[in-house]
Image (cartoon, rainbow, N blue to C red):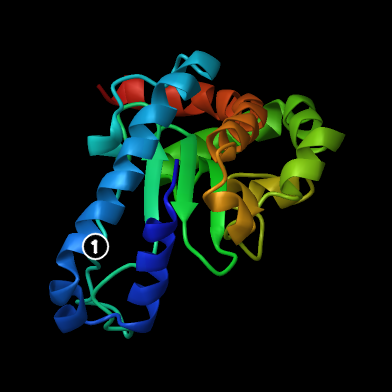
Amino acid sequence: MIEQSTVKFLKDLTNNNNRDWFCDNRKLYEAARDNFIAFIDDLIPELQNIDPFITEVNAKNAVFRIFKDVRFSKKKEPYKTSFGAAIGKDGRKSEYPGYYLQIKPNGETFVGGGIHHPQPDILKSIRSEIAHNTKQFEEIINDLDFLAEFGELEGDKLMRSPKGFDKDHPAVEHLKRKDFLMLHKFPDSKICHPDFKKHCLKKFERMKPLNEYFRGPVYDILENND
């Protein structure tokens, strides 16, 4: 389970996001990181029981580094103030839809799923799938249980219909999407609860139908490019 000391480290880092403090507290960081890695390693096999498509993944290739690339950022804080893991086929670099967990105190802990900033040919393939198979897509995202868990899909959208698609298509608002993300936030009180893993897995199971919907069009592009 996620330890209180891990949450405390992230809170302290938020208030001391600089290299001197981090170096002085390196051992606390390593203990918190190892706790999160252990949680992810424990989570993955149970998620694979829910979704066997998630293969070739472990905490090593799923967990993101805490160090930020600040070369092109206006904000120069050197560290992320969260722990995150993208659990998909082949880990965090996968182009397939998958599952995401972020641990960040102060109300920013969440599980997520779907697909984020897909490359142009994959995005076009997903849009084509939605245009030709709108009914199944809308049945998934308009399901009452889905809406209760995640609300509406999140992510960036175009202002106008994408090139190559009918601006009068009934699903044009979906076709404008550049991301297809489902998110569920957890209050801080849940993070260190013994049942937190179980709650994450329940949300991931509810995400599976939409992830499965996207895998076909993503597979078509990735396999054709091989």
Q: Which residue: 56% across, 69% down?
A: 106
108 horizontally vs 87: left or right: right
116 horizontally vs 39: left or right: right
Q: Where is residue 63, by image quadrant?
A: top left
Please, what is the three-letter code of the amino acid marked with disc 1?
Answer: Leu
Which image quarter is the N terminus in?
top left
Q: Position of residue 150 (x, y in %)?
A: 71, 46
Local SS, label 1:
helix
Q: Where is residue 57, by image quadrant?
A: top left
Q: Where is residue 143, by image quadrant?
A: top right
Q: Position of residue 50 (x, y in %)?
A: 55, 18
Q: Position of residue 125 (x, y in %)?
A: 51, 33
Q: From the viewer's perspective, is residue 31 above or below residue 209?
A: below
Q: Nearer the viewer, residue 69 or 45?
A: 45
Q: Nearer the viewer, residue 10 or 67?
A: 10
Say whether residue 170 is visible.
no
- Point out the residue furthest to the right here: 144
Q: Which residue: 33% across, 67% down?
A: 80
Q: Which residue: 20% across, 80% down?
A: 21
